[in-house]
Image (cartoon, rainbow, N blue to C red):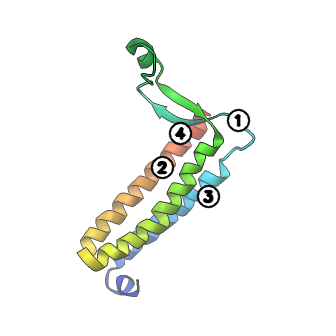
Amino acid sequence: MKEIYKEHKGLFYRMLVLAILALGLFIFGIVTLSPSSSVVKTGYSDIGSYDSVSIEEAKSAGGYQDGSWINMLAFPILAIILGVFHNLVAIKLYKRRGESMARVFVTMSAILTLLAIVTLARLIAEG
């Protein structure tokens, strides 16, 4: 880690941004859990389920799906994975493949984290 900090400041700052975004997703995910609610919005799909319904009914069944608040624990868990484990993987990538590969990996992880924050915000707004 010291080597990354001293020689590759760009990669270090990207790793720091990823950790901050993941921390934000973790806090946002924990704060917005509503265990008092038995049903919350847990997902969105433009295509409905094809389980024992006709295609026309399934097409109109798309939209927000209800579920238990426990399903929303996926967001804080994702934050831990993206913030901690992806930074550790980036360090391994740096050692094995070089700085450019680690930088791309961290950038993609940060984009995933932003998408998770946007998705969680939309689910919360709809619920």
Label 3 or label 4, whichever comes before in sequence order:
3
> In x, y percent, where is residue 44?
48, 33
Mark 2 = which residue?
116
Label 3 or label 1, whichever comes before in sequence order:
3
Q: Residue at x 70, y 35 (%)?
A: 38
| Cα separation between marks 2 and 3 | 13 Å
> In x, y percent, where is residue 3?
35, 87
Which of discs 2 and 4 lies nearer the camera? The answer is 2
In which quadrant is the N terminus drawn? bottom left
Whether tag 2 and tag 3 are in contact, CB under 8 A, the answer is no
Secondary structure found at label 3: helix
Whether tag 3 and tag 4 are in contact, CB under 8 A, the answer is no
Label 2 or label 3, whichever comes before in sequence order:
3
**Amino acid type at image mark 4:** Arg
| Residue 120 position (above or below residue 27) | above
Q: Residue at x 70, y 44 (%)?
A: 34
**Left or right relative to 32: residue 79:** left
Mark 4 = which residue?
122
Which of discs 1 and 4 lies nearer the camera? The answer is 1
| Residue 68 position (above or below residue 115) | above
Label 2 or label 1, whichever comes before in sequence order:
1
Please name whichever residue, 22 or 61, is drawn nearer the observer in this view of the structure.
61
Label 1 or label 4, whichever comes before in sequence order:
1
**Amino acid type at image mark 2:** Ala
Residue 59 seen in the current view: yes
Mark 3 = which residue?
27
Q: Tag 1: Cα neighbours inside 10 Å, few (<14), some, or many (≥20)?
A: few
| Cα separation between marks 2 and 1 | 23 Å
Secondary structure found at label 1: loop
Name the quadrant containing residue 77.
bottom right
| Cα separation between marks 3 and 4 | 16 Å
Mark 1 = which residue?
38
